[in-house]
Amino acid sequence: MIKIQNFIGGVLAAPLSGEYIDNYDPSTGSVYSLIPDSDERDVELAVSAAKEAFKTWSVTPVAHRSKILLKIASLIEKNLEALALAESVDNGKPLWLAKSIDIPRAAENFHFYGTGILHFASEAHPMEDSALNYTLRTPIGVAGCISPWNLPLYLFTWKVVPAIAVGNTVVAKPSEITPMTAYLLSEICMEAGLPPGVLNIVHGYGHKVGAAMTVHPDIPIISFTGGTKTGETIARTAAPMFKKISLELGGKNANIVFADCDLEKAVRTSVRASFTNQGEICLCGSRIFIEQSIYELFKEKFIKETERMIVGDPLIDTNKLGAIVSKQHYDKILHYIHLSKEEGGVIVRGGKAFHPDGRCADGWFIEPTIIENLPFDCRTNQEEIFGPVVTLTPFESEDEVLQYANSTKYGLAALLFTENLNKAHRVAAKLHSGIVWVNCWLLRDLRTPFGGVKQSGIGREGGFEAFKFFTEEKNICIKF
Ligand code: TXE
């Protein structure tokens, strides 16, 4: 039974409590490893190591920081197979998905920010013949990074890398549900020669380790991705301490299919946007609005295309959906499917748990589920389910669908399908979300600002936005 260790001050360490938490393989429902049940004492050790390392790391030449980050990127690529298998076993996602998306993107995060830091500069503001202003952007200190279980290494590195690239040191906590690849990254960081204390990983429960990080006086900046409820908890603690926070939270994204769309493309892309990673991506389009005149045709084609999304053992490449990440989340999704029926929904496909034969018989699997006949403002259409569950709703006009799409408390992402350019620009501009994809989904340019509005969060990640978040600006004005 693997016993995961914390990574503090450049060495692997057991939790001071000596206690461990069971870590489950969702595809079999069994415990396969143990996670440190760390607490505020381990966080204290990590903060001390990070503070010590900051003294040198923050003044290490950018070219040297870049070199180490690029070395880590190449080691991740070299260890792709092992990391992808670890991610699939830990999260339940298909192995092919971890191999093609999760792990390559983790390497890309190191490469993107490891090169981006070489080009990050700031500006000067000359005041004609009287003075010169210039802006200094300097690292802040020990950054706290807290990440979720849906894209474990992908989102862990999406936070940690820009933080250390600009010269901060980090205390990080991956989700206690999927800690494995962050643990394996510790070993890669040691091999790459990342100086001790630059990255510290403390494993354990959010309400213990995450909460201790959030309240720690020597962690002045927190970057969080996870549920809106937890984001609120973190903000309540951080706000009166005047900490800088970035919150990437939940979503309930609209997918709008106009009659003048390329129907085949809209169907294919909508199935991907509905069920990839078992629907456990905050960017999934879980509310599909279809123009009335093509509703039945789209529904027929969408259901047919969904038949191809075979659920089963994540280690078998022909399976498109793997297991749901935890028993608790599995129960939550099944609860919402039950609720949808109480709200008048008609399940046109799926709707049940799935029990594969063989080694995964006791795993946590749910069929891709399509529900229609629900009002846009019912709970099923307003609350984040975060599973392989989508609703289909017809609309007559642009105004009507914009009212539906913008009706939730979230505003992370949206998709729309039309071949009419004017309509694409017009509708995209009116959608209350931080990201809009037109005739595509999850097409990502890492330079773009990433984040949501309303209760989908605060701040933006990505590109130089991330570097600006993890640095402090100072304007210096010198009179001639
Ligand atoms: O997230 P949590 P969960 C949504 C999704 C899901 C819901 C809850 O709807 O059902 O959020 O998921 C740490 N102080 N998303 O329970 O609890 C926790 O240990 C500090 C959307 O996984 O928010 C973990 O490391 N930290 C999201 C991280 O927060 C705390 C992706 C996320 O856990 C804490 C995942 C506390 N008090 C879920 N409590 C997205 N936007 O992609 C927990 N944590």
Image (tube, grey):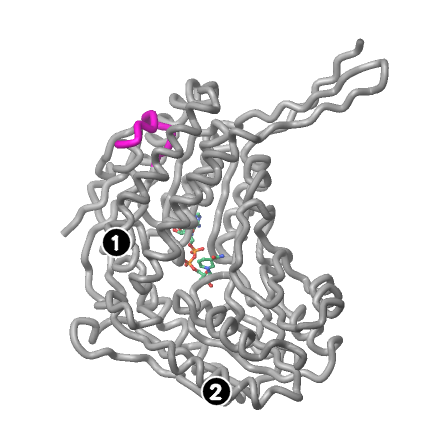
Q: Mark 2 Cα within 10 Å, few/some/many (few <14, many 20+)? A: some
Mark yes or no: residue 40 visible. no
Q: Is residue 415 above or below residue 44?
A: below
The residue most toward the top is 480
Question: Looking at the image, is mark 1 or mark 2 nearer the viewer?
Answer: 1
| Element under disc 2 | helix
Q: Is residue 264 magenta?
A: no
Q: Mark 1 Cα within 10 Å, few/some/many (few <14, many 20+)? A: some
CA–CA distance in space, label 1 to label 2: 37 Å
Q: Which mark is residue 341?
A: 2
Name the image quarter holding the C terminus: top right
Q: Residue 468: x percent and y percent?
A: 59, 35
Q: Principal SS element in the magenta part?
A: loop
Quarter occupied by residue 416: bottom right
Q: Residue 77: x percent and y percent?
A: 32, 44
Residue corresponding to mark 1: 86
Residue 445 is left or right of residue 175, and the answer is: right
Q: Which mark is residue 128?
A: none
Amino acid beneath label 1 = Ala
Q: Is residue 134 above or below residue 421?
A: above
Residue 168 is left or right of residue 82, and the answer is: right
Quarter occupied by residue 94: bottom left
Amino acid beneath label 2 = Lys
